[in-house]
């Protein structure tokens, strides 16, 4: 059933004001309606300009797919986080030429190296409401039929949009099925590494300092985007030329201090703040503890398998870093949600919402849908352990084999009927991933991670086991160990040429292949298709029913005088607030800026606090030039704000009241890791690299005067 459109209620809600000026991941189109709040917080620009994706500053903010970046010169120079670029740094590293350890500076543009065939920069040029068109064919349908109608509409709209060559288009679900927006982006395919500091600057403190304050990390890297000589997006070629962006940010040379206005623009991944009380409870009571335990074991298994081999450690450096971040984030999220008593708070809030709803006229249809939605969520818990583990049973090379079998199957269908992710538009991405795998795979390490995951799988109740997975790996650990050896000895997919050749083969040829991993993937495919069908049935119903919950929540928030922003979903968002201190507990007060003296204080000459000698010497010399803080009389490193951020905001530009670049977002504090589920203004802070520190490093420590000149910045 379709209910009252959310957009009308939302427009009214936005006029009611904010609970906290620092809370909210706002769509740019909402910002003109928040003019009063922006001005009160200290913004000196035109809020209407923030809604225009073709103008500065929003036109300069780009997505890397999982991270954010921004243009900082008219020659396609891009700045983002070191940890966002770690995959590209790792791809270009060897034990003999270890760019992770030593850093990288391209002295000339000819020295800039490819960030990899899968690297992309996406420049958003369109954000249009297509709700009516998306829902037109779904009305009156349920379950899988509802899902298929939405899927068909999405594919048609995307295909129409991508007829404009050089663009990548997608549909963003806003407010849980109430609104849909078409995102149109220029897809830049030739991305090159320009500058990366050594690990001991870009990741100073590593996991010890991750999500912690005070922080002293130079988490930044520069890329450059290239296009063909005709100015259109093109794959890597030595003949390509720098991209001319529609806008670029001006790097500020002004001081930064507590109380200053700050704004972050970026592509935050996913938040869950509008989810149900039962989903909050499931996250806290089951999923996060499960993730913490599993990831801890996976890290140990991977590190044990790479230990003693410099080559394997380089291959898996980016992977292990990602695992570690996932683990610490999960633990921090769990601690934070418990600290905020999130289960009780969300349950009380939902109960109050439902009580309010019961008093509203014409509430019956919303109540019915909400009850049906809750029943579906409850039923979904029956197989949650299985659903958590199965993705870990097809890593790396085995995952490539599964992907190849599925691609061959989908190629036998008309393109519009292919599964999303396997259409013609996706084949270049698949090929890039198959190429990139060569620098991130080792058979012995992959077998070790599979043995670990299979141990958890064999502990599942029999009702959650999957016959096809048992057929491939065996029914217990002893059998699995022997099977894994056979699987990886009998495959040739470890060779890039073989993988790319398999990508061109049809379903019958691949199904008949004697390659052991391709045979295993063929055995797994019926199970994966069956589970996918079950998920689509369930997701179709949730897509149909969740709008009722969201409409009730929006109406309730309006009655409280609170504004509603959509949960983050990797689309462009803006948050605004101030440079802010933090008092997380009794007797602890944190200042919002750190300085280079803290690097020396933490330094032990042992990883992860092994500051490079050139950095220590430069700090001792005290020659900070124009980047020194005029009040602190030294060089700042990081600063902290109360901006609303989450994963995906890494690399996001932090702007001052004039829209100038003052920092790069790269982390949150430990007390606020749980903000993807619950915003708590007492604790939520975001951590940023101060651009003054970046400038000083470029000028005095690992010099790149040509980049300072390109950004029109002082050389000293």
Image (cartoon, grey):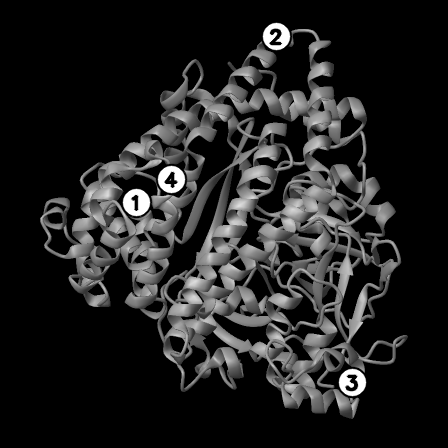
Q: Earlier in the sequence, mark 4 or mark 2?
A: 2
Q: In the image, what residue occupies the spot 17% across and 61% down?
A: 491
Q: Is residue 25 visible?
A: no
Q: Secondary structure at mark 4?
A: loop
For this view, does 401 lie left or right of residue 618?
left
As measured in the structure, the alpha-carbon distance from the residue carrying label 2 to the one carrying label 3 is 67 Å
Q: Is residue 26 above or below residue 300?
A: above
Question: Is there a contact, CB below 8 Å, between mark 2 and mark 1?
Answer: no
Q: Secondary structure at mark 2?
A: helix
As measured in the structure, the alpha-carbon distance from the residue carrying label 1 to the one carrying label 3 is 52 Å
Between 396 and 713, which is closer to the camera in this rendering? 396
Between 679 and 487, which is closer to the camera in this rendering? 487
In the image, which is nearer the foreground, mark 2 or mark 3?
2
Q: Which residue is mark 4?
A: 460
Q: Which residue is mark 1?
A: 422
Residue 650, x across and y down, in percent: 60, 59
Q: Which residue is mark 3?
A: 624
For this view, does 210 lie left or right of residue 289?
right
For this view, does 546 lie left or right of residue 578?
left
Q: Is residue 475 above or below residue 462?
A: below
Q: In the image, what residue occupies the spot 34% across and 62% down?
A: 448
Structural crowding at the residue carrying mark 2, measured as other residues with C-alpha within 10 Å and reported as few (<14), some (14–19) or many (≥20)? few
């Amino acid at each position: 059933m379709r209910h009252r459109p959310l957009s009308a209620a939302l427009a009214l809600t936005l006029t009611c004001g904010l609970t906290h000026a620092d809370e909210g991941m706002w769509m740019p189109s909402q910002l003109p309606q928040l003019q009063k709040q922006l001005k009160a917080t200290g913004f000196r620009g035109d809020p209407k300009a923030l809604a225009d994706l073709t103008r500065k500053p929003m036109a300069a903010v780009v997505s890397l797919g999982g991270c954010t970046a921004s243009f900082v010169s008219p020659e396609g120079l891009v700045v983002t986080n070191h940890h966002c670029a770690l995959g590209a740094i790792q791809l270009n590293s060897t034990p003999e030429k270890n760019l992770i350890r030593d850093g990288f500076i391209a002295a000339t543009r000819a020295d800039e190296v490819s960030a990899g065939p899968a690297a992309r920069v996406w420049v958003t040029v369109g954000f249009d409401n297509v709700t009516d068109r998306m829902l037109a064919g779904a009305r009156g349908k349920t379950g899988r039929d509802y899902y298929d109608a939405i899927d068909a509409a999405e594919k048609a709209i995307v295909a129409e949009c991508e007829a404009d060559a050089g663009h990548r288009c997608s549909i963003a679900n806003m407010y849980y099925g109430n609104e849909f927006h078409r995102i149109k982006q220029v897809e830049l395919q030739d991305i090159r590494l320009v500058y990366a500091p050594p690990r001991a600057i870009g990741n100073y403190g590593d996991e010890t300092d991750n999500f912690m304050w005070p922080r002293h990390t130079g988490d930044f890297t520069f890329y450059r985007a290239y296009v063909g000589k005709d100015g259109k997006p093109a794959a890597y070629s030595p003949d390509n030329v720098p991209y001319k962006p529609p806008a670029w940010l001006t790097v500020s040379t002004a001081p930064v201090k507590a109380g200053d206005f700050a704004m972050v623009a970026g592509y935050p991944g996913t938040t869950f703040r509008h989810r149900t009380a039962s989903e909050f409870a499931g996250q806290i009571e089951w999923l996060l503890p499960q993730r913490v335990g599993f990831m801890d074991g996976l890290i140990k298994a991977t590190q044990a398998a790479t230990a003693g081999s410099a080559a394997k450690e380089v291959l898996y450096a980016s992977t292990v870093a990602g695992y570690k971040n996932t683990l610490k984030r999960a633990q921090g999220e769990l601690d934070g949600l418990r600290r905020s008593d999130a289960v009780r708070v969300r349950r009380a809030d939902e109960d109050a919402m439902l009580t309010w709803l019961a008093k509203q006229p014409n509430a019956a249809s919303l109540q019915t849908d909400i009850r049906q939605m809750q029943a579906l969520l409850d039923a979904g818990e029956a197989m949650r352990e299985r659903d958590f583990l199965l993705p870990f049973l097809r890593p790396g090379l085995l995952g490539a084999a599964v992907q190849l079998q599925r691609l061959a199957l989908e190629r036998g269908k008309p393109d519009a009927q292919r599964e999303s992710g396997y259409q013609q538009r996706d084949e270049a991405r698949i090929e890039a991933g198959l190429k990139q795998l060569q620098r991130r795979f080792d058979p012995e390490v992959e077998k070790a991670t599979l043995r670990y995951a299979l141990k958890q799988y064999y502990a599942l109740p029999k009702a959650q086991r999957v016959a096809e997975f048992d057929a491939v790996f065996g029914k217990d650990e002893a059998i699995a160990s022997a099977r894994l050896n056979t699987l990886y000895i009998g495959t040739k997919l470890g060779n890039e040429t073989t993988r790319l050749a398999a990508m061109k083969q049809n379903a019958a040829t691949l199904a008949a292949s004697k390659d052991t991993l391709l045979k295993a993937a063929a055995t797994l495919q019926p199970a994966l298709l069956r589970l996918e069908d079950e998920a689509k049935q369930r997701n179709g119903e949730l897509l149909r029913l969740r709008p009722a919950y969201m409409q009730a929540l929006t109406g309730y928030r309006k009655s409280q005088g609170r504004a509603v922003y959509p949960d983050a979903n990797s689309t462009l968002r803006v948050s605004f607030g101030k440079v802010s201190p933090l008092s997380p507990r009794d007797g602890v007060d944190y200042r919002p800026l750190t300085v280079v003296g803290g690097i020396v204080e933490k330094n032990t000459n042992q990883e992860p606090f092994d500051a490079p000698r050139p950095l220590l010497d430069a700090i001792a010399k005290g020659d900070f030039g124009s980047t020194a803080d005029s009040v602190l009389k030294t060089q700042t490193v990081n600063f902290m704000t109360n901006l609303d951020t989450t994963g995906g905001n890494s690399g996001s530009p932090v702007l001052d009241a004039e829209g100038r670049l003052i920092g790069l977002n790269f982390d949150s504090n430990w007390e606020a890791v749980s903000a993807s589920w619950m915003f708590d203004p007492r604790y939520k802070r975001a951590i940023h690299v101060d651009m003054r520190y970046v400038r000083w490093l470029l000028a005095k420590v690992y010099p790149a005067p040509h980049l300072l000149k390109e950004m029109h910045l002082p050389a000293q």
